[in-house]
Image (spheres, helix red, strand yellow):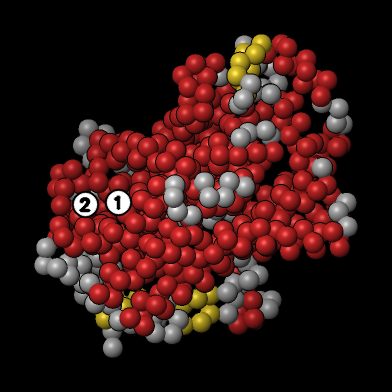
Amino acid sequence: MVWSHVYDPFGSPVLSTVVAALPLVVLLGLLASGGWSALGAAAAGLATALVIAIGCSGMPADAALAAAGNGAAFGLFPIGWIVIGAMFLYRLCVEAGALDVMKRSVTSLSADHRLQALLIAFSFGAFLEGVAGFGAPVAISAALLVGAGFPALEAACLALLANTAPVAFGSLGTPIVMLAKVTGIDEQALSVMAGRQLPFFSLLVPAWMVWAMAGWRGLAGVWPAVLVSGATFAGMQFVISNFVGAALVDIVGGAASLAMLAIFLRWWRPRQVWRHGEGWCEAAAHATAGARETTDTPGRIAWAWAPWGLLSLVMLCWGLPPVKARLEGRAGGLPAAVVAPEFSVPRLDGRVAKVPPATREPQEVERAVYRINWLSASGTGVVATTLLAIPWLGVPWRRAGRIWWSNLAALSTALATIAAMLALAFVTRYSGTDVTLGLALTWSGAAYPFCAALLGWLGVALTGSDTSSNAMFGSLQRVTAEQLGLDPLLICTANSTGGVMGKMIDAQSIVVSATATGTHRQEGAILRRVFPHSLALAALMGLLVWLQSGLLAWMVP
């Protein structure tokens, strides 16, 4: 028997919305309080979500528990698998001394932490978002920042803040592809619309990141580099999204931004160098000290960076549709049942249905299929790269094996936390309480274009993924837009572009950043630091969408 969502279980939209928000309030409240670990907060939020789903929404208990199990499994694979691979490569680089060489090579471009953050967190992070996504950019960027001498907590926050503007086009445009699938709007049209919103924030985010790190004085001192980094990425983001497609936006934009900034720094230097813990010093003195410290040959620098360059190349190839189809057994090779087996989730698959206004259909039965695409998964590409890097780095295989097991042990708590976070997200999704929260924003009437971006922001904060937020709220956004006489293309795109601003506060990303930087049990401090930035940027995106529904309507294709 199919159970249909009940979006107003109390017969009072206000009360139903308040109750639906409780799991998120419990999770973020306990996390921000600082007194609870991330795992404890996630467990409490999950328990709250289960009680509400079963006791208030009337969801069958076995279906609710199955949804939690499905979410936990998804948290471990494919999400946790990416983190395991990325951190294994990082630890091998530390063991081989490659990370020290990388640190010196970045310092040779500039010893200034503001410029290093632009290079690593924004430009290189955007490139990684394009080739991998799903937590890899935050994990790798944060780890590299720590290696470059950033305080661990600061590195985690900067990696999260930088991982915003590229997210809608991440993992070869996966969020846009999903949005097109659930809304029925042409994929290229969505890419064009997103490319007319996000470039403004690609210009803003690097400046915002430097300001958050070093204040107005710090931003004023490096504004030419900020402009080169942001404008290059924004320009490529607009051109590729409008005239090519969603898949290559971040890859081309991130690579171009990284290259242009590196070239620019060869002939331009700030008057003063700023570093965490050291403050300000004269650039000439720091340049002399840096020159004495940098003794690595070009070959040695290439050796150190090669595993990360190989990772980018492998992940790019791994995500290309023809390659992915072959790795999943859809275009020859090994049978799909071997490389990508699928399992219907017992007690959940086909037992839950969306109803209007969350869908345009009278009833939309939800599928629950767990897919173990172990060969095509992004994490497998990371691990494959790491295996190739072991002999390159000169680490003995036996020693690499010990590092692998110590890496798993060190990540055990983080993996359990990610599993609990995704379990909460899946219970929220299958019980329909996420739609209850979304419907609350549809009451805004003429202000709905502003709220559409906030709905996407909420979706990513709940699920940890712009792709998942688009799957969850995309149809609701289209239905609401049509009811209010708004352009569905503008409103549905806002779900994705507004959602990117929620990426820095979703619990999954916070745990990944804390794991990569070794700041365990400081997840609350990270959340408190990035939350105001996330909300402010989401509000600015909402303002842009609202303007594009009126004064700037000429920007909508």
What is the x, y in percent for residue 432? 28, 68
- Residue type at mark 1 is Leu
- Name the image quarter holding the N terminus: bottom left
Q: Is residue 249 visible?
A: no
What is the x, y in percent for residue 296? 85, 31
Measured Cα–Cα span from mark 1 to mark 2: 7 Å
Labels in figure, total: 2
182 horizontally vs 421: left or right: left
What is the x, y in percent for residue 170? 51, 51
Residue carrying label 2: 441
- Would you place residue 214 above or below residue 350 in this image? above
- Would you place residue 534 above or below residue 208 in this image? below
- Would you place residue 83 above or below residue 360 in this image? above
Q: Mark 1 or 2 closer to N-term?
A: 2
Badges 1 and 2: C-beta atoms under 8 Å apart? yes
Q: Residue drawn at (46%, 60%), measured in percent from left and top?
A: 40
Q: Which mark is residue 455?
A: 1
Helix, strand or loop at mark 1: helix
Q: Which mark is residue 385?
A: none
Farthest residue, direction left? 11
Query: For this rendering, which residue is in front, 174 or 190?
Result: 174
- Residue type at mark 2 is Leu
259 horizontally vs 14: left or right: right
Q: Residue drawn at (21%, 59%), measured in percent from left and top?
A: 17
**Residue 412 falls in image quadrant:** bottom right
